[in-house]
Amino acid sequence: MAGNDPDGADQSTLDEGTSSTEGGQQIEAARKDAAGDASSNQESTEESTQRSIRDMLDDEGGASVFVNRDLVEPDTIIDEERIVGRDDQLESVVSFLKPTLQGNRPPNMLLYGPAGTGKSLIIGAVTQQIIELCQSKGERFGVVDINCQPINTLDQAVYELVQTVTQDIGTEIGVPETGVSTKRKYRRLYELINEHYDSVIFILDEIDLLVGRRENDEPAYSKLLYQLSRASNTNEIEGRVSVAALTNDPKFMEDIDGRAESSFNPRDVYFPDYDANQLRKILQNRRDAFRQDALKDDVIPLVAAFAAQSHGDARKAIDLFRGAGDLADERGDEGVTEDHVRESQEEIDKDRSLKLVEGLTTQKKISLYATAAVAHYSNWTGSSVPSPVGFKVYQWVTNELDADQMTRETYVKYVKELSTYGLISASRKSRGRGGGMYMEFTFTGDPEAMMTRIIDDTRLEGIAEQEELLSSVVNAQLKEFHNQ
């Protein structure tokens, strides 16, 4: 039985209270210790994580298979001894540009041929040598080089030329991108050239893609060629001026304005496809991009074989060569093998169409989408797309989108252009006596995958949601075409 103190308090209760207080203090202390331990653990974890990130950043990994990766970059200007299979073209471009070194105006040039056949390579190599020779004489030779593929309008093209010049000479652009006339941008361009160059060459790569927004008007490339090629004759540019237009499709000259054709009046240089042996030599001449022991013997022949299948495109060969090396580095492998080449080729095949689609204008995307829809939804045997049917579906799509509508000729032209990229094959067909001719398009890949990629990049989502309606439109048009 517990005793009582004089105040009548139960001693056991006091003891329990004391014990409870001490216990609470111990619990609180334990909590603080636990919190301290947790904080310490958290700090330790964060410190460990930080060290891990630093370790990863500091870790150089295994030795790279590359020793000079720039040699397998497509835009690298290489030494002339590495140029293969383009002796005639090199000699022509040199002879055309040589007058620059003699104080004379060189002729304008049209460099044409399939993609990846050395057009940019040759003009770049020659102009680089001219720059150096002119510098040694105290003369100022300017190279103003733009790619017209991502440019939509003449105004944007002139602004791009201004921007290219200012980057070369290190000065302010001096004109806003929007809000002023194209004429004002031309004046700024001429002002910069007169101030900083004694002679200049404008290199307009993929010139045929600069069509502008108003398709029924004179093409934007026609206006640009006219202005630049006559700038020295009108004294807007005081020095010597020449224009080099590069294209996969020389037929673009058929749409050029008569005045522009007369003013431009180029000397032609044709670039044919590379054959497998030339591709192999091109790769051998860039072998020193890799460590001496990094390439297995079957790598270069396999890369050349893949590229030869892609219509002799040296750019694709070099991209594949580099991609196989990058894959080896990512995996920490000591060398580049046939497996790296094959896997890299698979990745290139997946990415190529997406990259091409991203660079197309909206009208070209709509044209491609309508054509792919016919191939995908067709209930008829085979997946070929007659151009009259593709155009009818294109008209339906543009009506649904409330978009500008091009002529049938322009639609066919756009889709035929895609054959130069390997997305579509095109052939001319006859409907028999009195039936006329038409183009037939066949997709080299999956048309549905192409439609998906276009949808991701345009305002065609609403059309894609009308799958049943689009399918019925396609097959109604096919039925009408085949029953005629």
Image (spheres, rainbow, N blue to C red):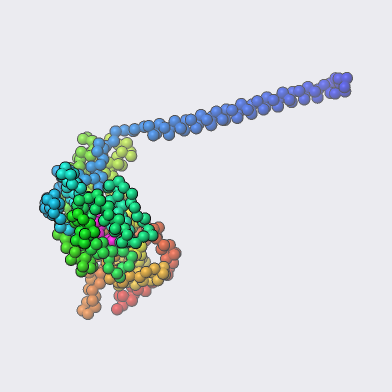
**Residue 435 falls in image quadrant:** bottom left
Residue 4 spot, x, y in % from top left: 86, 21
Q: Vertical placement of 337 versus 383: above or below?
A: above
Foreground: 168 or 212? Answer: 168
Foreground: 315 or 165? Answer: 165
Residue 63 shows in the view: yes
Region rendered in magenta: 204-210
Q: Vertical placement of 25 versus 323: above or below?
A: above
Asked if the magenta segment contains residue 68, the reply would be: no
Question: Which quadrant does the C terminus fall into?
Answer: bottom left
Residue at 35% across / 66% down in the picture? 370
Residue at 64% across / 26% down in the picture? 30
Residue 412 spot, x, y in % from top left: 28, 68
Residue 234 spot, x, y in % from top left: 21, 62
Residue at 57% across / 27% down in the picture? 37
Q: Vertical placement of 367 versus 30: above or below?
A: below
Residue at 41% across / 62% down in the picture? 459
Residue 1 spot, x, y in % from top left: 84, 21
Residue 316 shows in the view: no
Foreground: 255 or 169? Answer: 169
Q: Vertical placement of 150 versus 413: above or below?
A: above
| Most distant residue in the bottom direction | 434
Asked if the magenta segment contains residue 206, the reply would be: yes
